[in-house]
Image (tube, grey):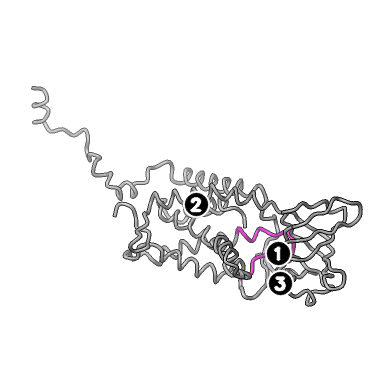
């Protein structure tokens, strides 16, 4: 796997693009999806510590079925009173698919790749870099910069008004700050 | 689209190979191992023990491996006949570096998560902040 930093940066970049205006929750959900597949690492370490055989764990999690199952589990980890479960699941799944796509850049040798249709062991990969390739985080930073630049060009540097509303900030902002009644002016003068 | 490519090498888990070497005898295999014993460098071929319980033989041209090196290798399996895998090609992975680089990613994600949600232990669910 490329490191988690690269996955999170790509997840944030995609999250910033999928919803307009930019929504922090959506960005978070996509970035959650972009790292949830690598939960096989701590599970694998735990299994190894307990003396269990973890063969197939990595392949199973890094597959299309694994992405769907893990996205389902991750979407269920949030409060379920809201009716946006489907949207949450889709955003996490989008992040998970971006993870698989990024992982498919790994493995320069032809026999390397992700078993997307596991348990069928047919490797899919672009065969570009080894997993320890030092430039992966730079790719993530570049992707995020490109997306931010795109957002600035297309939307400008506007404040995120819906978010301010959520926090109740608009109530503190006077609607017409310079409109003063004639009576108030007279009182102020006195 | 990425597509499966036919290759002369069979990808195999080292533990599977170790448990069942006869199945892969004489075949070209591709696997990952960790070096457990490294003899002093000598001219010609060097035999290394690996943590997975067998030995690999590398030519001088492939370089010298150290104990703890995580190695992806391609070679011919002669574990039953010669007791070694004769390595043809290898890549020494820097295991520590990706893990170290993962730490800031994890921190970034956790900060984002807990700036928007809090964990309700009673319901074992993340609840939006401000609720």
Does residue A174 appear left or right of residue B38 in this picture? left
- Name the disc covering residue A112, or none: 1
Q: Name the residue under label 2.
A: A12
Q: Position of residue B10 (x, y in %)?
A: 76, 70
Q: Say few, some or many: other residues with alpha carbon within 10 Å of mark 2 (under 14 / 14 to 19 / 20 or more).
A: many
> Looking at the image, which residue sits at the far right?
B44
Q: Mark 3 points at which residue?
A: B16
- Name the disc covering residue B75, or none: none
Output the chain of dot 2: A
Q: In which quarter of the image is the N terminus of chain A?
A: bottom right
Depth order, front residue of A106/A39 = A39
Q: In which quarter of the image is the C terminus of chain A?
A: top left
Q: What stretch is highlighted in magenta?
A: A102-116
Q: Where is residue A186 in the image (x, y as percent from the top left)?
A: 9, 26
Marks 1 and 2 share the same chain: yes
> Looking at the image, which residue sits at the far bottom?
B23
Relative height, residue A57 to residue A180 (above, below) = below
Helix, strand or loop for disc 3: helix
Marks 2 and 3 share the same chain: no
Q: Where is residue A59 in the image (x, y as percent from the top left)?
A: 62, 68
Q: Say few, some or many: other residues with alpha carbon within 10 Å of mark 3 (under 14 / 14 to 19 / 20 or more).
A: few
First in sequence, mark 1 or 2: give its number: 2
Does residue B93 appear left or right of residue B61 in this picture? left
């Amino acid at each position: 796997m490329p490191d988690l930093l690269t996955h999170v940066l790509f997840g944030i970049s995609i999250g910033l693009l999928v919803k307009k205006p930019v929504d922090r929750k959506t960005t978070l959900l996509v970035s959650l999806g972009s790292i949830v597949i690598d939960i096989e690492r701590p599970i694998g370490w735990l299994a190894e510590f307990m003396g269990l055989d973890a063969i197939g764990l990595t392949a199973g999690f890094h597959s299309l079925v694994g992405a769907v199952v893990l996205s389902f589990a991750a979407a269920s980890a949030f409060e379920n009173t809201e009716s946006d479960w489907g949207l949450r699941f889709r955003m996490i799944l989008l992040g998970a698919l971006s993870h698989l796509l990024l992982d498919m850049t790994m493995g320069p040798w032809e026999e390397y790749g992700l078993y997307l249709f596991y348990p069928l062991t047919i490797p899919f990969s672009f065969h570009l870099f080894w997993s320890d390739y030092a430039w992966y985080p730079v790719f993530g930073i570049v992707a995020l910069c490109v997306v931010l630049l795109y957002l600035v060009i297309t939307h400008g540097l506007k404040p995120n008004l819906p978010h301010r509303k959520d926090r109740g900030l608009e109530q503190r902002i006077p609607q017409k700050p310079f409109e003063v009644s004639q009576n108030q002016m007279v009182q102020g003068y006195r | 689209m990425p597509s499966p490519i036919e290759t002369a090498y069979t990808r195999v888990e080292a533990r599977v190979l170790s448990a069942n070497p006869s199945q892969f005898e004489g075949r070209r295999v591709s696997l990952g191992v960790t070096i457990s014993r490294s003899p002093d460098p000598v001219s010609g071929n060097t035999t290394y023990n690996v943590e997975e319980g067998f030995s690999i033989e590398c030519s001088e041209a492939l370089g010298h491996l150290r104990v703890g090196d995580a190695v992806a290798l391609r070679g011919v399996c002669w574990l039953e006949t010669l007791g070694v895998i004769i390595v043809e090609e290898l890549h020494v992975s820097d295991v520590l570096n990706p893990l170290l680089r993962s730490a800031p990613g994890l921190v970034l994600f956790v900060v984002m998560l807990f700036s928007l949600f809090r964990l309700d232990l009673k319901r074992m669910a993340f609840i939006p902040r401000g609720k």
